[in-house]
Each structure stands twice: as C-alpha cells, then as structure tokens.
C-alpha cells in the first residue's frame, strides 16, 4: 500500500520552495513575537478579548486540517498552497479595518484555519517535489531559510514600530499580507514530480480510514505529539520559568529565542548535512534529537534546584542550554518531518500530513495550560515531565522503526551505500 523508489532527482524550480519559505517566514516573524499587542492595536479591542478570540478561533481552525488533507490528495499540494496563501494575505490585509468584535473574530477564524492547514500542505509539497535523501536536504534548507525569514520579519516589525509608532502595526499587517502574496508567486516555477504509475489517482483513495488503520504511522504521529510539547517549551514555558523560578531578567528569554532562531538559520543545512553523510536512519536521528531535548531539560531542572545568584553566570548557563536545545531541534526536525512524509502512501499523502499536523496543533493548544499548571507545583516539575515525554518519543520512534518502509527509515542514498535496495518494506497496515 506504500510506494517508494530510489529516485532522488532534482525537480525543475525546486529552489522556489525554500525561497518561498523564507518570504513566508518574514511575514510570520512580523507578527508572531507581538501577537497580542499586534491584534490589540490593529483592531482596537482589549487584550482579554483578543486573547479569547485567538484561543477559540485557533481551536476551531483545527477543523480545516482534514479538509486540507482531502484537497491536497484531490488537487495537489501546490494549488492548495495558493489558496492558503491567498486566504492569509487577504486576512492580514483586512485586519487593520476590523474594528468590531464580529469582524475580527471572522477574520481570525479564517486566517487561523489557513495557518493550521498550511504546514500539512507544505510537507505534502516537499513529498511531491523531492524523494530519497533529497527530501532531507530540501526540508533542512526550507526550515533554515524560514527561520532566517522569521528573524528578519521580527527585526523589520521592530523597526516599523520604532519609527512609525502605532501605525507601524497596520504597516506590519500589510507587510505580512504582501509577504504571503509574494511567497505564492514564488511557487510558480516549481514543477512537482509526476507520480509513479498507479501510485496516485486524484480524488480517489480510502480516505482517513487508511490513516487510522496504519499503526506504525500513528506511533510516529504520537511521538511527534510528545516532541511538539518540547518545541512549545521555548516560547511558552521558558519565559515563565526564567522569571518565576530563576528570578532572572526577562531579556534572557529573548536572548535564548534569538540564539535558537539564529542557529536554526545559520547551522540548519550544515547539521542536516552531517546527519545525512553519517548515514543515520531518520528514526535514530529523530531519537537523538529527543535525547538532546531531554539533556537541555535536565540542565534546566538542575538550574531550578541551584538557582545561580550571579546574573552573568546564569546567562552563560542558559546560553549553553539554548545551544544544546537548538542542536536537538536541528537534528530532530528534518529527520522527523521527512520520516512522516516518506511513510505516507503517495495517493493519500495529504490526509497523512493533515493527521500528522494535528499532533502539532493539539500540542500547541494544550501547552499553555499544561505548563502553567505544572510550573505552579514546582519549577522543576515541567522539566521532569518533558524529560519523560522526550524519552517516550525516542522509544516510540525506535520501536516503530522495523515496521516502517525501508525508504522512509533510510534515505535512498544510504540504502544504496549499504548495498541494499531502496524498495519499501512490506506494508504493515
């Protein structure tokens, strides 16, 4: 039921995918670091109302994921990307004019649905335009350039706010809309690979029943849910832990975020290349990333017990922790994402990626309440919890390894180097 091949050829216009990811990152970076303040200023609504609307619309927007998966399987990933880019561009172009609660909630719901569906279509598109080890390279370069775009967008928004004051928020919204429109235009030269004979028939297939029956894929998705909590920790848990438990400066949280973003942008392709050249199985590489996450969380648990009084010492230790955490992200992310893409049967890849993306979205929705509850018990409790989830995720990935297709676990070039065949393992669905 799964298809696979050893082809790893380059696709015409594939450069457009990482470049579009960078431009998309600029737009996202312009509002994500300032989300509540951003929407408060462009709509005039209170912070409480804005927060409640974003929470509700974000959860309701999850319903778009299954629909996006079906659309990708029927029409292809690139046309769906065009629609999602268009919806996000229109939404942010109109946000400065949404002065009423009804208008803001409507726009927030539409853009939240597009935001939730976008990563599933993006991963499906990578699956359509690349195969074998080339998927790993394309994933790593796209992620690196997107992180670079996020940093550039955050800097651009800061400059707009510094020089334009309150009107800078409206300019940032329109700049964000422009970035989405430009990213869509950049995808035009991209020419997805032709599906293998019999591998894909638009508009047909067993639907989500196949996804729910695929136990190895569900294990991979469950492991990703646990790891998605680790990804949420830097933005949600770390700032609170720094101020409430370590009594450190809030500026250190921004510094850690900057280190993470900069290293992802600068070292992402290099680290991904090292992992590929080492011939690592994608499952083992992702598990190594989990281990590095656990190591950084263990260090934070120790810091919660010791609580260094020296500001410079605390800053140095937190910098080291941020580097270890980021290294885990650089190793885990490309391997885990491509593992999921390569595990999915080509005919229903969109549905598979929608289900996989649901694990990210649920973790992001649960993280704030989960982390604040655990932190209220003791500053070390959330990190102990994350150490356990990271260990469980690594164990699940390794356990699922023997039941996954060979070309999903090993990049095709690694299989060939080992003297094997890139043909898939028998289906276990």
Image (cartoon, helix red, strand yellow):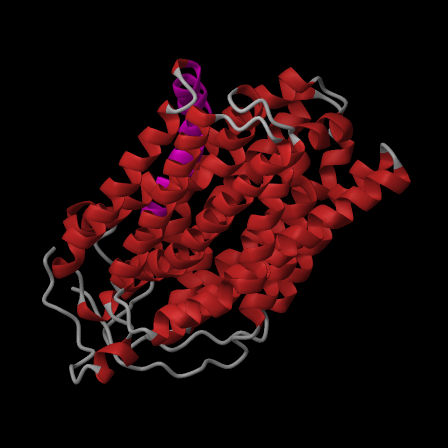
**Front residue of this view, candidates 41 and 107:** 41
**Which quarter shows the C terminus?**
bottom left
**Front residue of this view, candidates 69 and 295:** 295
Q: Please provide the residue range marked out in magenta.
A: 354-376
Q: Assess whether residue 23 is covered by the magenta stretch.
A: no
Residue pictured at 36% horizontal, 23% vertical: 381
Q: Is residue 195 left or right of residue 64?
A: left
**Front residue of this view, candidates 159 and 13:** 159
Return the x and y of residue 110 as percentages of the image width and height: 57, 37
Residue 76 visible: no
Residue pictured at 17% horizontal, 81% vertical: 421
Residue pictured at 62% horizontal, 54% vertical: 25
Q: Is residue 6 above or below residue 287?
A: below
Return the x and y of residue 90 as percentages of the image width and height: 67, 45
**Which quarter shows the N terminus?**
bottom left
Secondary structure mostly seen in magenta is helix
Q: Is residue 112 above or below residue 10?
A: above
Q: Is residue 175 left or right of residue 290?
A: right
Return the x and y of residue 56 as percentages of the image width and height: 51, 24
In the rendered image, which quarter is residue 19 located in? bottom right
Return the x and y of residue 331 as percentages of the image width and height: 39, 58
Q: Is residue 378 left or right of residue 205?
A: right
The extreme right residue here reads 163
Q: Assess whether residue 374 is covered by the magenta stretch.
A: yes
Numbered label tally: 0
In the rendered image, which quarter is residue 310 located in? top right
Residue pictured at 70% horizontal, 45% vertical: 30
Residue 247 visible: yes
């Amino acid at each position: 039921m799964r298809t696979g091949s050893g082809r790893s050829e380059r696709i015409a216009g594939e450069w457009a995918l990482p470049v579009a990811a960078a431009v998309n990152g600029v737009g996202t970076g312009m509002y994500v670091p300032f989300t509540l303040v951003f929407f408060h200023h462009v709509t005039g609504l209170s912070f409480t109302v804005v927060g409640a609307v974003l929470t509700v619309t974000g959860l309701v927007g999850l319903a778009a994921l299954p629909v996006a998966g079906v659309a990708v399987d029927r029409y292809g990933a690139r046309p769906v990307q065009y629609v999602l880019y268009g919806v996000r561009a229109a939404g942010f172009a109109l946000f400065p004019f949404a002065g009423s609660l009804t208008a803001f909630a409507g726009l927030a719901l539409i853009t939240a649905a597009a935001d939730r569906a976008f990563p599933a279509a993006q991963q499906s598109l990578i699956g359509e335009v690349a195969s074998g080890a080339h998927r790993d390279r394309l994933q790593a370069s796209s992620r690196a350039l997107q992180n670079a775009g996020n940093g550039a967008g955050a800097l651009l928004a800061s400059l707009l706010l510094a020089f334009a004051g309150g009107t800078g928020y409206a300019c940032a919204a329109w700049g964000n809309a422009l970035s989405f429109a430009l990213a869509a235009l950049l995808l035009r030269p991209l020419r997805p690979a032709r599906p293998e004979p019999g591998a894909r028939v638009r508009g047909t297939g067993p639907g989500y029943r196949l996804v729910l029956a695929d136990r190895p894929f569900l294990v991979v998705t469950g492991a990703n849910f646990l790891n998605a909590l680790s990804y949420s920790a830097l933005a949600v848990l770390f700032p609170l832990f720094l101020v409430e438990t370590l009594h450190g400066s809030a500026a250190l949280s921004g510094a850690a975020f900057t280190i993470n973003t900069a290293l992802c942008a600068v070292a992402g392709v290099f680290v991904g290349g090292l992992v590929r050249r080492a011939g690592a199985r994608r499952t083992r590489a992702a598990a190594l990333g989990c281990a590095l996450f656990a190591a950084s969380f263990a260090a934070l648990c120790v810091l919660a017990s010791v609580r260094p009084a020296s500001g410079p010492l605390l800053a140095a230790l937190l910098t080291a922790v941020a580097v270890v955490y980021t290294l885990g992200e650089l190793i885990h992310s490309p391997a885990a994402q491509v593992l999921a893409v390569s595990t999915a049967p080509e005919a229903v890849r969109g549905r598979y990626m929608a289900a996989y993306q649901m694990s990210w979205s649920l973790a992001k929705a649960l993280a704030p309440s989960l982390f604040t509850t655990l932190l209220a018990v003791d500053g070390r409790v959330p990190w102990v919890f994350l150490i356990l989830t990271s260990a469980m995720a690594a164990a699940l990935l390794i356990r699922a390894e023997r039941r996954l297709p060979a070309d999903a676990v090993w990049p095709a070039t690694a299989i060939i180097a080992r003297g094997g065949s890139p043909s898939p393992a028998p289906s276990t669905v």
